[in-house]
Amino acid sequence: MPNSHDLSENLMSLQSHILLEEAKFPTASGDFTWIISAISLAAKSIANHVRRARLSGAIGKIGETNVQGEEQQKLDVIANRAIIRCLGTRASVAVLASEEHDEPTILRRGNEGGKYCVMFDPLDGSSNLDTGVGVGTIFSILRNDPHIHDAQGTVCQPGTHQVAAGYVLYGSSTIFVLTTGNGVALFELDPFIGSFLLVKEKVRIPETNKVYSVNEAYRETFPEGYRRYLDWAHQNGYSSRYIGSMVADVHRTLLTGGVFMYPPTKKNPEGKLRYLYEASPMAMIIEQAGGLAFSGSKRTMEHEPREVHERVPVLLGSRAEVEKVREFVG
Ligand code: AHG
Ligand code: MN
Ligand code: MN
């Protein structure tokens, strides 16, 4: 048997992948790696809770609403606590901003070693939990600006400032998707060894796919251009796929192409999705995979947020498909 080794057979964990990426920056301190490792640890814990939620009585609402005015699921709180317990121990984390917290939390100032801010949606799509639909965690990492002393000001940065972004999909398997600005990598959790293993590097979104993903129940309150796009799509052989968990809808769009959108509606005139921990990180992932992401007429990554929980319209996906929608909506 010739001893030719097929390099594609190598096993590469998320940890090793990040260390390899970090080795490309001689001045890197390793702090960043610790943050990704903390998120990976939290993701394993959340996956465990999600996958046995009924057995452990973790399904259902806790009877409180969060700052968004949305009813909190027990697993929203469990996931939020898991992330904070993992990230709180990392010495380089300056500020944490969570969908579930009214205000960001300052852990360490710049002069105490706080180098990074982490924004996260601990459990995205949580209203789908009781029906077993894919849910996820979304995260975004920014550098801390030591000259800004209020937490809100520190985290309210445009998506172009992100040093990393990603999500975890708790679906038929547990998938970790990450970009550090050098392409998109996809990992799958091997539950038997408890490690996220590299499945694909340099993930590219297909240029086109005749699939649009939107909650058409709100169609009559969409701006007119979106309604004209939908009429065009109905007459041009498009199919519709909508799960109602952003992580699941965006992951499908990333892998199979098409377009995902959450337009402005009467109920949410700015759109429903939050910029810092939903739209901005997902825009970085999609752009890094060769797609486009817009919020209104502006590139999502260039939006300048003023509030932690600021909402923006979202239009993202395959280049040709996003451009087609923009022909109608401008
Ligand atoms: P979250 O569960 O974190 O509040 O996010 C839910 C979001 C997002 O996951 C999804 O795309 C959107 O809500 C679905 O909203 P509609 O039910 O209005 O379509
Ligand atoms: Mn969400
Ligand atoms: Mn959420």
Image (cartoon, helix red, strand yellow):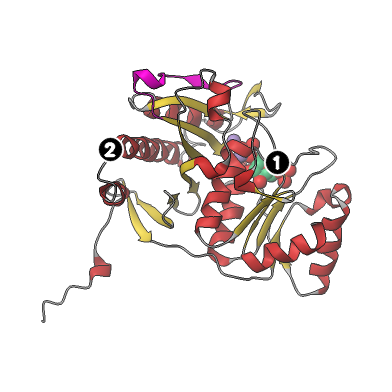
- Inspect the image, locate mark 2, and give the three-letter code of the amino acid beneath it: Gly
> Mark 2, residues whose alpha carbon is within 10 Å: few (<14), some, or many (≥20)?
few
Of residue 296 and residue 63, the one placed in the foreground of this image is 296
Give the image location of residue 144, x and y in percent.
45, 29
Quadrant in the rendering for residue 124 = top right
Give the image location of residue 91, x and y in percent.
32, 25
- Above/below status of 182 relative to 313: below
Give the image location of residue 193, x and y in percent.
27, 48
Give the image location of residue 58, x and y in percent.
52, 31
Quadrant in the rendering for residue 290 = bottom right
Of residue 179 and residue 111, the one placed in the foreground of this image is 111
Q: What stretch is highlighted in magenta?
A: 101-115
Q: Which residue does the numbered mark 1 point to in the structure image?
A: 312
Q: Which residue does the numbered mark 2 point to in the structure image?
A: 30
- Inspect the image, locate mark 1, and give the three-letter code of the amino acid beneath it: Val
Of residue 105 and residue 144, the one placed in the foreground of this image is 144
